Amino acid sequence: GCQSMGKNSDPPDSLYHQLGERSGIASIVEDLLYRIVEDPRINEQFRGIDVRQFHTNLTDQLCELSGGPCTYSGRGMRESHEEMNVTATQFNALAENLILAMEENDIPTGAQNRLIEKLVPLYPQIRNL
Ligand code: HEM
């Protein structure tokens, strides 16, 4: 319902809500995975991963980062990417695929940008800089 006062754990304008809550985020991550597999800039890196676990962990991470009631329980971003030598181009390729996956799920542009902003601080960890 619409609450103008008091505490609401999921107000309609929250990023988590705009992403469609955990089920919406899970759907975005599923579409992201299909795009990763099709993208020659990054698909080699993902060969042989546990897709189910990656899906669960990335969904939990994006849920938590967007203010949702999830707890990410995977490894740290530095630890999980340090052997990969992720390039700037590859980082951008993943972000671009995420934007396209959000577009496919009718996420408003403002919410897309807000999620991408949450990922910017992870850049040095993922690139192992
Ligand atoms: C905004 C950018 C990124 C985010 C938020 C992100 C997030 C994550 C998360 C949450 C995991 C799961 C870690 C775990 O299971 O413990 C993961 C794993 C992984 N990431 Fe990323 N990642 C990003 C960029 C990239 C890029 C650019 C690449 C490669 C081109 C990449 C390749 C991988 C691979 C291959 C795994 C699986 C590792 C394994 O299971 O051993 N990631 N990432």
Image (cartoon, grey):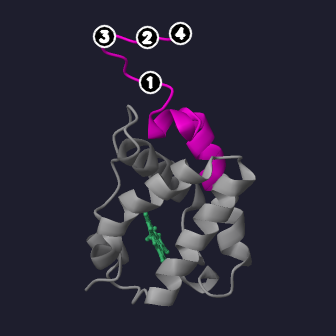
Badge 3 vs badge 1, beta-carbon distance below 8 Å = no
Q: In whole angstroms, how far apart are the C-alphas of marks 2 and 4?
A: 6 Å
Q: Which residue is mark 3?
A: 6
| Mark 3 within 8 Å of ligand 1, using the beta carbon | no
Q: Which residue is mark 4?
A: 1
For the point 46% across and 54% down, which residue is it? Answer: 115
Q: Residue at x 28, y 78 (%)?
A: 124
Q: Does the beta carbon at disc 1 come under 8 Å from ligand 1?
A: no
Q: Residue at x 50, y 58 (%)?
A: 113
Residue positioned 34% across, 10% down in the render: 5
Quarter of the figure with the C terminus: bottom left
* Residue ID for mark 2: 3
In the figure, is residue 25 to the left or right of 38?
A: left
Q: Secondary structure at mark 2?
A: loop
Q: Amino acid at mark 4?
A: Gly
- Ligand 1 - quadrant of the structure image: bottom left
The answer to whether the residue labelled 1 contacts the one labelled 2, judged by CB atoms less than 8 Å apart, is: yes
Residue situated in front as seen by the camera: 30 or 46: 30
Q: Residues within 10 Å of mark 1 (few under 14, many from 20)?
A: some
- Under circle 1, the secondary element is loop
Element at label 3: loop
- State which tag comes first along the sequence, 1 or 4: 4
Per the image, the residue denoted by label 1 is 11
Answer with mark 1 or mark 2, whichever residue precedes in sequence.
Answer: 2
Tag 4's secondary structure? loop
Which region is colored magenta? Answer: 1-29
Ligand 1 is within 8 Å of the C-beta of the residue at disc 4: no
Q: Disc 2 vs disc 4: Cβ atoms closer than 8 Å?
A: yes
| Vertical position of residue 67 compared to residue 32: above or below | above
